[in-house]
Image (cartoon, rainbow, N blue to C red):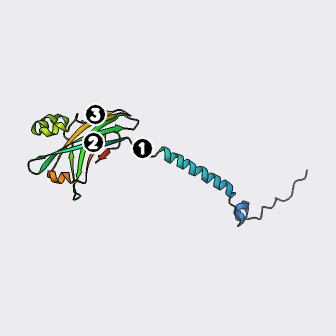
Amino acid sequence: MATPDRAPEPDKKTPADQVLIPDEIDSSKWEMPPWGIVGAVLLVILIGIGIVSYIMRPQPKATGTIDEVYAVALPDNNIMVTMKVNLQNVGGKTMYIRNIKTQLTTDQGQQLSDVAASAVDFPRYFQAFPDLREHTITPMRVEDTVLPGHQLRGSVMASFPVTLDQFNSRKAIAVTIEPYDQPSVTITK
């Protein structure tokens, strides 16, 4: 075997010439996938978003009504109001009541609020205003529980700095029940 008497010549290509360029990038022609495939993928994505949106939609946890509202006049242009409230737990969790608030909207649009009276104070109010007793049922209390699918009926008492005539011409009265681990429920009449 004969040995070459000279060394092989190095490639005369420069490093820029040695870069391999794929055909897709090399040419100015770029092709989209077939429109049928793109349409099918978009349709599947939209259906998936629709299903997730339907499952994750907000669902009511509780509903309620204010069945009766009765007010008596207090000295100094104040009133004491008792409301019979019906609270229905339509959610899947037990509801534990943390707080009960009331709000009055007068005919002039003024909004007045008060925290509901404690159930312990009801007998004292009945002693001072016997008419309230006739329009009151068992007090709704903080820490009451409402099981899923059940309802709680009770009275809520509050006072507002308006006259009885202003109260009778009100726009709305509302009771807001705030559970511990669920959104609050506002019942308006």
Please provide percent x and percent y for residue 95: 34, 36
Residue found at x 21% / y 49% = 113
Task: Say which element carries label 2.
Answer: strand
Which numbered disc flags the more N-terminal residue, 1 or 2? 1
Task: Give amino acid for label 2.
Answer: Asp
Residue position marked by numbered label 2 in the rendering: 67
The reply to whether callout 1 and callout 2 are in contact (CB within 8 Å) is no
Task: Give amino acid for label 3.
Answer: Asp
Q: Nearer the viewer, residue 14 or 86?
A: 86
Residue position marked by numbered label 3 in the rendering: 144
**What label sits on residue 59 in the rendered view?**
1
Quarter of the view holding residue 117: top left
Q: Is residue 181 left or right of residue 141?
A: right
Cα–Cα gap, marks 1 and 2? 24 Å
Q: Nearer the viewer, residue 150 or 30?
A: 150
Residue found at x 64% / y 52% = 40
Q: Residues within 10 Å of mark 2 (few under 14, many from 20)?
A: few
Q: Residues within 10 Å of mark 1 (few under 14, many from 20)?
A: few
Asked whether residue 126 is in view, the answer is yes
Q: Nearer the viewer, residue 165 or 186?
A: 165
Task: Say which element carries label 1.
Answer: loop
